[in-house]
Image: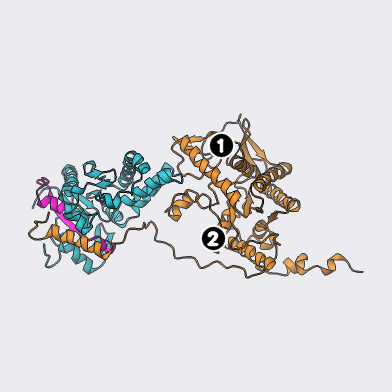
Chain colours: A cyan, B orange
């Protein structure tokens, strides 16, 4: 039985890029025991937090999640891990930021107080965030949240989404938005990772070289590749390595029951 | 020998109009001067009771006008907490005729409000609407910018409305002895610092109240010749008095004066009317049934009854059926923010990403 710190990557389809980063060896994962628990975003509607764990509300959903977990977990207990990276998990910020930038440049007047309120309500109102907050509220695993990355930059698709006025205030405003989200998340016991600056172009987009393969053909501007996954995973690993080990950590299977015939 | 009382209808006699009736059957208290239709553009302002008017109008799909709706996409809770949509502009409560006149003169004339701000713990509060920004503004500049939007909204409301409903609330207020401006609340209560050498208590007397309301009406009618004004008096008693009287007698004085001002203005000005929500809630005929146990808060059934009378008396005077409110919509799930639903194609892409990443050969790039 390993004594390594245990990091679970919990997410929707956006967690795939983290797995790819690991598989492709883009990140040094040694010294940390990694586990994945996730499924497509549509299934997140069928998850709930109770009794210290994220539970699917039906058997079908439980098996869908178990299918992509190496140990066939049917549910995700926070206490089984030292750290949990909540990756994507249908926690979106792009629309929130874009809407605020529009208010700030086109009016009507938006105070900083209301800006903060819109951001914190917008974050806390998302079901994926509430699952993260539930996990953090157990006081067991350190919960790290990486919201869904900005859309992949594409001039044709997004060229006019940011007006010159928005672009002018964007660097300062978006940095402030992230700070507000981080503070709100910290109040809920969550360490929120802003999108890594090296992955951002034009202030509010993800660099095209971090898109999934053939993203233009697939018209997929939302998912990202192993390079993006590496940027997030390396940060999460740093944190996981620094999290103090908890005595008596429950081992896999003790709390998160296994599914029969798990495929991975 | 005949006399004028012989031919009067039932509602002019106490026994037939009040004593012999169940309180909820007392009707016809208002003989409206002008018609308020669904398409009539209505703005509301004043004491806290005024917000019930806007809610009732909106619920019945009347054309209540909001000239300061705030940023798009706010949730109902955010709008409520930041005082958007409570009144037709974001002044918060306007309790006195002087405060109404003050706002109107800043909005409709060259008169400028003082750049005074109340500070508390590094945040700034507008002395003329201290409750509109929970937690205060981050700077005086932000406060003034926000106030400027409100003044523009007031001007647009007066110019764009057909009916301006104003609910008078109090006669007591605090003023700055140097500038003469009147504050929304006593300095030092919500924020700011009370300065006994500068901040003075006033309990407006009848002549001042009439003078302020007349001046306010003049400003409004000058800006909009078609405007009608509907006055009401808030039935909510004073929470506290600085008059030196008992709060109960101070309440009587305040409300009596405001009620008298309303009648005087109706008598003097053809474009002004008074709707008796004050009587419907407070009169002994109703035996206090519309008050909560604290005898101050008005119960929802009281508000409903007031507004039912409003629409019934309009229908009686101008024809048509009293408009009933539609059933309330189902309550939204608390704290639920709208999340983009995945289309079938998006869901497929998501699944492909996961399958690729977790495929046994794991060669996906």
In terms of secondary structure, where does tag 1 sit?
A: loop
Residue range in magenta is A18-46
Viewer-nearest residue: A87 or A81: A87
Badge 2: residue crowd in 10 Å (few <14, some 14–19, many ≥20): some
Q: Position of residue A176 (x, y in %)?
A: 34, 41
State which quarter of the image contains the C terminus of chain B.
bottom left
**Based on the displayed image, in which of its 4 quarters is residue B114 positioned?**
top right
Badge 1: residue crowd in 10 Å (few <14, some 14–19, many ≥20): many
Report the chain holding disc 1. B
Q: Position of residue A18 (x, y in %)?
A: 16, 51
Residue A7 left/right relative to B59: left
Residue A62 left/right relative to A176: left
Per the image, the residue denoted by label 1 is B187
At 32% from the left and 45% from the top, the residue drawn is: A181
Viewer-nearest residue: A65 or A96: A96
Q: Position of residue A142 (x, y in %)?
A: 22, 48
What residue occupies the far right of the structure in this picture?
Answer: B1
Q: Is residue A208 above or below residue B33?
A: above
In terms of secondary structure, where does tag 2 sit?
A: helix
At 25% from the left and 49% from the top, the residue drawn is: A153
Give how far apart the Cα atoms at labels 1 and 2 are. Answer: 34 Å
Q: Is residue B76 above or below residue A259?
A: above
Q: Position of residue A51 (x, y in %)?
A: 26, 59
Confirm whether the magenta stretch covers residue A28. yes
Q: Residue B58, labelled with which disc? A: 2
Which of the two labelled residues, at mark 1 and mark 2, occupies the earlier sequence position?
2
Viewer-nearest residue: A3 or B270: B270
């Amino acid at each position: 039985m390993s004594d390594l710190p245990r990091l679970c990557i919990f997410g929707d389809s956006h967690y795939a890029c983290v797995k790819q980063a690991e598989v492709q060896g883009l990140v040094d994962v040694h010294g940390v025991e990694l586990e994945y628990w996730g499924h497509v975003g549509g299934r997140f509607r069928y998850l709930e937090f109770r009794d210290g764990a994220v539970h699917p509300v039906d058997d079908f959903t439980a098996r869908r999640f178990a299918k992509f977990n190496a140990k066939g977990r049917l549910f995700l207990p926070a206490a089984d891990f030292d750290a949990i990276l909540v990756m994507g998990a249908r926690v979106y910020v792009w629309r929130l930021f874009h809407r605020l930038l529009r208010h700030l440049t086109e009016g009507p007047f938006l105070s900083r107080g209301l800006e903060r309120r819109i951001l914190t309500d917008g974050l806390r109102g998302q079901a994926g965030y509430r699952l993260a907050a539930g996990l953090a509220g157990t006081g067991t695993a350190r919960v790290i949240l990486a919201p869904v990355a900005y859309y992949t930059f594409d001039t044709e698709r997004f060229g006019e989404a940011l007006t010159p006025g928005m672009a002018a205030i964007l660097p300062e405003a978006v940095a402030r938005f992230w700070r507000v989200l981080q503070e709100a998340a910290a109040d809920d016991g969550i360490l929120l990772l802003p999108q890594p600056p090296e992955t951002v172009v034009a202030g509010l987009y993800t660099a095209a070289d971090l898109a999934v393969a053939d993203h233009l053909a697939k018209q997929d501007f939302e998912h990202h590749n192993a390079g993006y996954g590496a940027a997030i995973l390396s940060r999460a690993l740093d944190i996981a390595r620094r999290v103090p080990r908890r005595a008596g950590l429950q081992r896999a299977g003790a709390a998160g029951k296994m599914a029969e015939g798990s495929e991975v | 020998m005949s006399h004028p009382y012989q031919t009067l209808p039932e509602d002019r006699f106490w026994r037939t109009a009040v004593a012999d009736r169940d309180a909820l059957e007392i009707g016809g208290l208002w003989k409206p001067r002008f018609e308020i239709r669904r398409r009539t553009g209505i703005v509301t302002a004043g004491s806290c009771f005024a917000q019930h008017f806007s809610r009732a109008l909106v619920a019945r799909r009347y054309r209540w006008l909001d000239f300061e709706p705030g940023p798009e996409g706010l949730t109902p809770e955010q709008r409520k907490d930041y005082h958007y949509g409570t009144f037709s502009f974001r002044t918060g409560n306007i309790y006195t005729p002087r405060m109404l006149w003050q706002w109107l003169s800043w909005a409709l004339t060259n008169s400028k409000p003082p750049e005074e701000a109340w500070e508390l713990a590094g945040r700034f509060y507008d002395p003329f609407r201290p409750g509109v920004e929970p937690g205060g503004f981050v700077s005086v500049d932000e406060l003034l910018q926000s106030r400027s939007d409100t003044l523009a909204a007031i001007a647009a409301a007066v110019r764009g409305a057909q009916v301006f409903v104003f609910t008078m609330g109090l006669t007591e207020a605090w003023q700055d002895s140097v500038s003469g401006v009147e504050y929304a609340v006593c300095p030092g209560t919500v924020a700011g610092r009370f300065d006994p050498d500068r901040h003075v208590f006033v309990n407006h007397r009848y002549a001042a109240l009439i003078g302020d309301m007349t001046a306010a009406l003049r400003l409004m009618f000058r800006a909009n010749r078609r405007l009608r004004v509907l006055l009401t008096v808030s039935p909510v008693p004073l929470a506290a008095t600085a008059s030196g009287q008992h709060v109960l007698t101070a309440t009587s004085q305040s409300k009596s004066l405001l009620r008298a001002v309303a009648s005087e203005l109706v008598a003097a000005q053809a474009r002004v009317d008074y709707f008796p929500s004050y009587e419907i809630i407070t009169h002994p005929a109703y035996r206090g049934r519309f008050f909560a146990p604290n005898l101050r808060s008005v119960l929802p059934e009281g508000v409903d009854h007031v507004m039912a009378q409003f629409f019934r008396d309009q229908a009686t005077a101008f024809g048509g059926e009293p408009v009933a409110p539609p059933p309330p919509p189902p309550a939204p799930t608390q704290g639920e923010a709208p999340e983009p639903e995945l289309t079938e194609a998006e869901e497929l892409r998501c699944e492909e990403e996961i399958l690729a990443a977790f495929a046994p050969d794991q060669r996906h790039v």
